Amino acid sequence: MVSGVEKSANLGAFCQSEKKKEKDKKKKMKMKMKKEKEEESVGKKITIGVCVMEKKVKCGSEVFSAPMEKILERLQCFGEFEVVYFGDKAILEDPIECWPLCDCLIAFYSSGYPLKKAEAYASLRKPFLVNELEPQYLLHDRRKVYERLEMFGIPVPRYACVHREVPDQHLDYFVEDDDFVEVHGNRFWKPFVEKPVNADDHRIMIYYPSSAGGGMKELFRKVGNRSSEFHPEVRRVRREGSYIYEEFMPTGGTDVKVYTVGPDYAHAEARKSPVVDGVVMRNPDGKEVRYPVLLTPAEKQMAREVCIAFRQAVCGFDLLRSEGRSYVCDVNGWSFVKNSYKYYDDAACVLRKMFLDAKAPHLSSTIPPILPWKVSEPVQPSEGLTRQGSGLIGTFGQAEELRCVVTIVRHGDRTPKQKVKLKVTEEKLLNLMLKYNGGKPRSETKLKTAVQLQDLLDATRALVPRSRPGRESDSEAEDIEHAEKLRQVKAVLEEGGHFSGIYRKVQLKPLKWAKVAKSNGEGEEERPVEALMVLKYGGVLTHAGRKQAEELGRYFRNNMYPGEGTGLLRLHSTYRHDLKIYSSDEGRVQMSAAAFAKGLLDLEGQLTPILVSLVSKDSSMLDGLDNASIEMEDAKARLNDIITSGTRTLHNNGSAEKPWMVDGTGLPPNASELLPKLVKFTKKVTEQVRLLAKDEDEELAEASPYDVIPPYDQAKALGKTNIDVDRIAAGLPCGSEGFLLMYARWRKLERDLYNERKDRFDITQIPDVYDSCKYDLLHNSHLNLGGLNELFKVAQLLADGVIPNEYGINPKQKLKIGSKVARRLLGKIMIDLRNTREEALSVAELKGSQDNLAVNKTTKEDTEYHTKPHTRNEESRRTSFNSERSMDQDDDDDKEPKYRLDPKYANVRTPERHVRTRLYFTSESHIHSLMNVLRYCNLDESLQGEDSLVCDNALDRLYKTKELDYMSYIVLRMFENTEVALEDPKRFRIELTFSRGADLSPLEVNDEIAASLHQEHTLPIMGPERLQEVGSYLTLANMEKLVRPFAMPAEDFPPPSTPQGFSGYFSKSASVLERLAKIWPFHKHVNNNGK
């Protein structure tokens, strides 16, 4: 018999069992329902609601404005989204309960928009908000905008506010004088800016000082082709309302507009500033001309903080770049870039990730290799201008990541460089020299500006004889020669119909003086009576050079950054890439750099704004041969002896296996026999060009010397990459050169190459003959000059030996000259690599941190670093990173600590990965010099027994590579093996490659692509070749050891100057950055408060 206690216990156990069964059943049901819900959600599209006034988002046949339409179309192509637009009727008349339901909401204020009603809807439905609604009230008051910017440490111009309750209200703290206003003791001297406090009032005034004539310029929203008007009679400021006064920031006539899409993406465009002349620059389609520009790292951080400060994912703001610093002067809220398909692609991808993270985190936000709206687009055919080559070693292990790309590039195809020297005694020219040297009789004068060159042209036109004297004339030969040179100067100055000092420079240097009576009759004064005039011209980048450089840039974009897919195509917008481009002072080098940048960054438009925005000049690093001039003269003298004597000398274990160790290697054995042939064919070509020039001269003689019709416009040609078909069809020389200048070029070569009286050859003229010959074969083959092909073959044989030996006739001399010429460049390259290593090591040490933001404040300093003092003062809000600095001050961002985003906040697949790219554009001398150091550095006495950086196979190929032609380049890529210990030297590997450039012969007939390009006056660029054996491993440490003796030490680079009040690059503490991130939690999947 069961006791009551046992029954009670059994009953309890039974109940517990039933409860457990019931609980398990409910759990299974819940899991089933969750699974069904997830399965249902997989097929359900995310709804994007567009709650915007129709004037901003048009309804009807044009549902959306152009940028909005393009971006939303792209979003829908992913197949994950459905777009619903509300329309004015619903927004203005319907209650919010009747508004369409949506998962994500696009809503922003415009005139007449019920912002409070939109806030109530967001609070009710709690969609994910692209732009928060409450902060949009701030954007209507310029005072609040500046206050918010300052709160977040974002630099703004110095300003002060004047608040009036009623018009013309007297204010004790406001004082106005003729040339300044004073607000609360804060004085603003003219020119200053006056802005209405109301941000919807776009009438902004600039007041000018009386010393400049006074007056006021009114800026306003574009009306037709005007964006400002000048009012010379207005001197007093407005008093009818409340205004902000701020100092005028000189920006060089350019404004920058920045567009963010989330805190980690920023696109910037520059436009002509309305303060210049008020005329809006428009393209042929009537749209305002804007140019994409790079943001500095500090400006990118400013974009991020603007985005966070106002909690507006899609946000536009105005940036002023003035005297090396950057300031935010206006925040506009919702703004999209117009007419940029690349931006539309980027914006769609960023918004997609934002929406998926918020509403469907279980879905992958990885961007497909081919964007869905581009699947049906035809693949753009390659022009074959840049060849693949064998230098890029395919794929790498998952653990090895690219960290740095350093590239040294020779400029593109150019016209032959020319120089005219003549002694002048004409009063007009001597007076011109005195006019521009301040009246100093013993000082030389350099003429480069348009006004100066126009004065010279006017004087020259008056001096050039109307016709040439005939042979029967009794004029002396020297007078004829002088007149010919004056005629050549005149032709050069008239070339192109406009002046550009970057390509034409004139020097006047006094040689003889005499005492003459002063004009007032009081005593005597010294006056020059003879001067030397030197005119330099030519060396201009051709249409082919621009095409080559742009194509090479595209090749780099697609091939130099492995494993990136489309990620690195957005170099001008991404936060993970650090790009700097340097150029020598030569115009052809600068324009090559700009064209390359255009291709690399997939930019559009003319080269000039790209050059100004992206390329930094550094003549001390990339120009000049002065340091090695004595050694190079010695090499040329020895080279002359070898050619004329026909002897060779083995140098330091030279052998048949290592022919590059021989003195004068590469010279043809019959060089002395080829020289007379070179002279013979040069004379033959010169005579044919003389006949063509004679016909042209006779035609010009019939016209007035002041009525010259320019045959070619250099300015219009700056962006061209195609031949001038009309000139070719007319039987004229390609480019800007006429027959008169073409004849002058060949006649000078003929005279300088061989002195008949002394029976002496000048071998230094061989490269110039080869240069002119190759140029005419490529660009002027349609003139059918007889003997040009034969001349080229002879000139090429000699030039292939002469040019490399001008930089040293044996390896040790090449090493000595190379180290002197490229010493500063080598030092900078090593700084680039070391800084990248230190940065990568710091990132590796911080990786895995659980902090919301990983702030690297303790970057390890090496001897090449010069850190800036991190000071704070009252004006720190005004300071910013200096975006344009010469190499004498080095790279600011190479010196500063940097922070990295924590991966869980980042909108990129590998947020901790950063790639540094440094591009150096230079001339032939620096390419040869750098290559000679790389291949022969182990021959230095301090490095005895060390292997060369370049393998024997590559040394042999370099020996057979006679010319490093236009667009030749050397690439150093550094990879980091993340699976190797931090202290292991093998963590960083260096890969060396080079390209011979466009070194195919214009006479090449067995290459179909080259033949096709030849029709366009262009030659293909050879692909990269390895300088190391496959499988070899060059560590950064080993390269440092071999290169250090020839590179400028880091301590010899002058330290960068610190702007007053500079508070450190990204020097906010981790706690402050964490607080900033939490204010607007982009990383969270759901917006809980709907604001």
Image (cartoon, grey):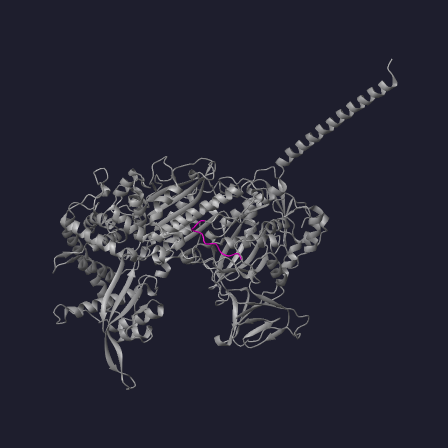
> Where 887 falls versus 801 (above or below)?
below
Q: Nearer the viewer, residue 948 or 795?
A: 948
- For the point 58% across and 62% down, the residue is 874
Can residue 562 be seen in this snapshot? no
Q: Residue furthest front?
A: 942
Instruction: Look at the image and give the residue range highlighted in magenta.
Output: 862-870
Q: Is residue 768 left or right of residue 1085?
A: left
Q: Is residue 481 left or right of residue 136?
A: left
- For the point 66% across and 70% down, the residue is 164
The prevailing secondary structure element of the residues shown in magenta is loop
Q: Residue furthest top?
A: 1
In the image, residue 864 lies in the stretch drawn in magenta: yes
In the image, residue 1081 lies in the stretch drawn in magenta: no
Q: Residue furthest bottom?
A: 521
Query: Looking at the image, how many numbered discs can be counted on the residues?
Result: 0
Say which quarter of the image contains residue 702.
bottom left
Can residue 778 be seen in this snapshot? yes
Residue 879's x, y, as percent? 53, 60
Residue 816's x, y, as percent? 28, 50
Q: Nearer the viewer, residue 156 or 242?
A: 156
Q: Nearer the viewer, residue 408 or 485?
A: 408
Residue 424's x, y, as percent? 23, 71
Say which quarter of the image contains residue 366.
top right
Q: Quick one: quadrant of the N terminus?
A: top right
> Where 77 falls versus 335 (above or below)?
above
Residue 949's x, y, as percent? 33, 41
> Where 785 falls versus 971 (above or below)?
below
Q: Is residue 431 left or right of residue 874?
A: left
